[in-house]
Image (cartoon, grey):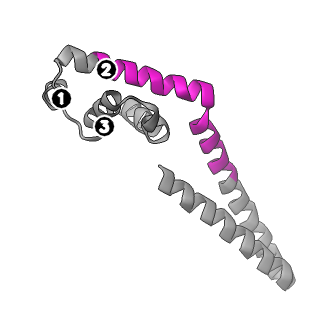
């Protein structure tokens, strides 16, 4: 269940604004604020069954958006590749320092800085 909560939460971060208002609120109340179906029903003035149906439709739409657009998959792939860049940059920086290649060391530090900026800006998205 925890995996689904995390998965829907990530999908919601990427595609939540594409949902209808009631679907958006249902997902937010259920997955973010951990409200029960009854509590959500009171907030939205619909039955528990209505909340359940709205949640299922919203979840299906989120999964459908990811299937069609693949933004989460692309995001995860890019994040891993930037981490690889950081790892290799660190190795190059170490070797350049040992060999006294100041210009190379300086350029590698710039590359690492850019990679870190990308990772930090990606964290703001989610």
Is residue 60 found left or right of 101 in the rendered image?
left
Q: Position of residue 46 (x, y in %)?
A: 18, 21
Check residue 54 in the rendering and tell me which mark sits there, or answer none.
2
Nearer to us: label 3 or label 1: 3
Q: Quadrant of the N terminus?
A: top left
Residue for badge 1: 36
The numbered mark, 3 or 1, whose residue comes first in the sequence reads: 3
The numbered mark, 2 or 1, whose residue comes first in the sequence reads: 1
**Number of dots carrying numbers:** 3
- Circle 3 packing at 10 Å, graded few (<14), some (14-19), many (20+), is some
- Circle 1 packing at 10 Å, graded few (<14), some (14-19), many (20+), is some
Is residue 101 found left or right of 79 in the rendered image?
right
For the record, the magenta segment spans: 53-81
- Circle 2 packing at 10 Å, graded few (<14), some (14-19), many (20+), is many
Q: CA–CA distance between discs 2 and 1?
A: 13 Å
Residue 62 is covered by the magenta coloring: yes
- Up-down: is 4 above or below 93? above
Q: Position of residue 109 (x, y in %)?
A: 72, 75
Q: Secondary structure at mark 3?
A: helix
Q: Position of residue 53 (x, y in %)?
A: 30, 15
Residue 13 is covered by the magenta coloring: no
- Which residue lies at the image location 47% right of the left edge and 49% below the top edge? 126
Residue for badge 3: 28
């Amino acid at each position: 269940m925890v995996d689904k909560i995390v998965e829907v939460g990530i999908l919601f971060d990427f595609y939540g604004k594409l949902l209808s208002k009631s679907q958006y609120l249902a997902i937010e109340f259920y997955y973010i604020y951990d409200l029960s179906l009854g509590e959500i029903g009171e907030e939205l003035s619909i039955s528990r069954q209505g909340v359940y149906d709205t949640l299922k439709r919203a979840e299906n739409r989120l999964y459908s958006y990811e299937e069609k657009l693949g933004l989460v998959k692309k995001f995860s792939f890019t994040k891993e590749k930037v981490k690889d860049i950081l790892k290799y940059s660190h190795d190059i920086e170490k070797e350049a320092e040992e060999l006294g290649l100041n210009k190379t060391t300086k350029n590698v530090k710039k590359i690492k800085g850019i990679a870190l900026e990308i990772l930090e800006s990606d964290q703001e998205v989610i």
